[in-house]
Image (cartoon, helix red, strand yellow):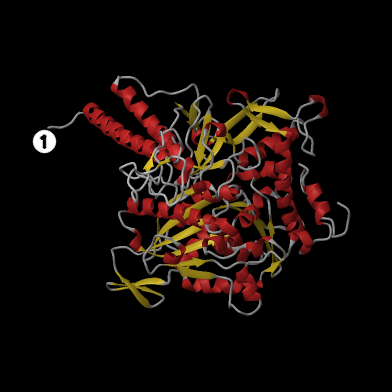
Amino acid sequence: MPKISQEDYQQRLDRLTEIFADIVSHADEQATHRCPYRDARDRCTAAFSCANQIAAVEKGEPATCGHDGTFDYSLAWETDPATRDRAKTKLDAIKRAAAARREGKAPPTGPGTVSHDGKTQPLAIGMTLFDCADELAVEVPTSCQRNGRCHECVVEVSAGEDALCARTEAESFLRPPYRLACQALVERDDIDVAFAPLRRRPRILVRAHAEAAGAPAMLDPLVTRRGDEVLYDGDVVDRYRGQILGLAVDLGTTTVVLDFVNLETGKSVHSAAFENPQAFGGSDVMHRISYDRDDKAGELQKAAASAINRAIVDGCARLGTNRQAIYEIVVAANSTMRDILFKLDVQGIGQKPYKSSIEHAFLSGERANTALSARALRLGLRANRAARVYGLPLIASHVGGDAAAALVALEEGFAEADTVMLVDMGTNTEVVLKHRGRMLAASCPAGPAFEGGLVRYGMPACDGAIEAVRLGEEGEAAYETIGGKEPVGLCGSGLIDLLAELRSSEILTAKGVFAADRKQREMTVVPEHGITFSKEDASNLGQAKAANYCGQYIVMRALGVDPAEVESLYLAGGFANYVNVRNAQSIGLLAPVPQDRVVKAGNAAARGARAILLSATRRRALEREVQAIEHIELETTPDFFDLFVDGCQFKPMPTHLAPEGTAV
């Protein structure tokens, strides 16, 4: 058979498209202007009187429809007229584009543009944002063929919302500025539109995974092999398929990290990371708790499960296997993220006494521990049909399984030192301090300011994020970006550097306002790219900083420890791994522990989850150990408000902590 040229193929495709569009247009015309009670012979079948009825000549015959074809009957049968209008707009655009190509012209566009991550294309009426993503070579997830059912193609529209159609019923679970890419139709082409999917790939902590690559000292997973049989906790669940894999998941509020592990050798074989797509429900856990109720309950769980599934499919493809080889998934997450994934009601975590329903059950003696286990199938995760999902135990309240996992990863350091502290920095920061045999933990609702939220040009640690900043004598910025790309915004480490530089040059006061002689509310950081920093940005960062400040201060003070007495301060989490410690201490984000004692622990939660995946013995021990950790609610501290106000200022934490009740 002769090969068809690309040009001939496109012409035939355009012709078929036009034929289809004409059929649909004719059907639409008939449906709009033809009465639903008018049959093929123009007779009226209605059982009621109508002014358009023409009485039959012969008695007993139905009346004839005398309608002149000008009345719009569509509302008589349509349940969603907006859907018809959108489809018509889309078809008209397809016809125009096909006709233009047939005449050797470019498809018609307007003066507006659509852009993503520095790439720009002309805007055309009738395109959806999914079509625009195709044109810009942007990967947007979907599993329902773009018909609005799967809710996976959520995008954030940062500019040009007025160019798009009104929200459809399929988008009712979303708040501005979020849309479903398959539903957001361009209705105006004279406005610039910018969007981004909620699945950018942040920088993976290479060091953390390099450390995790080798076999662990203790290898006794629940999933084992006996000849050609695969067993889970001693029970046969499958035949051997050539590999036995497990998945360690660090499910963070902002980012998600997955580690594929060979359960027979204990070695990591693949890693993946992406932004948590639940951002449409809010940028911190309290907003997501508020979102996950009533008619929107379950949307966040579906978003997380779908994102993990896509990473599973991609990882298995890279490994040359399929999901049936995955027999267990271990999840390290804070209390809210874990319980949402396990389809539990999280409303109790958002109100006093801020405890999960699982923690309540444990405290009342109904459960032996706070760990969770469920079938992957029930949670909608694509693994072997017999696969189980294990959620690491909570410590207390918002101090969840991610903190417990970090302690597993750092257990050697905690065992060797008398006074040691963990600060797992993130949207919800956890602080754990060990001193003379006691362990005390607290959670700090830091919010998303240092991880891409509430700061106009803030962003996660993705390509193009400014990660390091120095200011010159004239205030000009010298900076480094992730991936060496053109700057798009500032990630957490860059924001810390900028704050420290603004303070040392006295451009910004300790209270986060620009010096009086400057008379400004905003400054330009990178003029050529329009990146600015404002007083409002500083205020939001100050509050996030204050939460971290209070957590460290109150926990150390409760155990009678000054910063200089801490033998090792472990900084965990993707954000903390790239922080300039000197700068972070200068603005009071970190306790003034001698810098040679500060250890960047990388993604300790992911490493801890992996250790639990590979050792049933360590898993059982952790379920007991977390019960001995004391917990302190920061808000119940009598002088919490005073400490928080003081912590909002960009100045170092005192080296000697004032006793409780003493004025700060």
Residue 603 in view, yes or no: yes
Q: Residue at x 58, y 26 (%)?
A: 529
Image position of 61 (left or right of 486): left
Total marks shown come to 1
Name the amino acid type tagged 1: Met
- 81 up-or-down from 517: above or below: below
Q: Nearer the viewer, residue 113 or 647?
A: 113
User: How many other residues sit within 10 Å of disc 1, few (<14), some (14-19) or many (≥20)?
Assistant: few
Left or right: 430 as drawn, with respect to 58: right
Outermost left residue: 1
Q: Which residue is mark 1?
A: 1
Q: Is residue 32 left or right of residue 102?
A: right
In percent of width and height, residue 164 lies at 52, 34
Spot occupied by residue 107 in the image (x, y as percentages of width and height): 37, 24
As drawn, 441 above or below 497 = below
Q: Residue sitting at 33 percent across and 34 percent down?
A: 21
Residue reaching furthest to the top: 104
Up the image or down, 218 lies above or below 252; here it is below
x%, y% of residue 269?
Answer: 38, 55
- Observer-nearest of 602 and 442: 442
The N terminus lies in quadrant: top left
Please give the name of the residue rendered at 50% of the width and 24% of the height, measured from the top-left corner. Answer: 112
Mark 1 residue element = loop
* Among the 4 quarters of the image, the one containing residue 534: top right
Residue 655: tell me if it is visible.
no
Residue 599 in the figure: left or right of residue 654: left
Residue 175 % position (x, y): 59, 45
Name the foreground residue: 527 vs 172.
172
Q: Residue at x 45, y 54 (%)?
A: 306
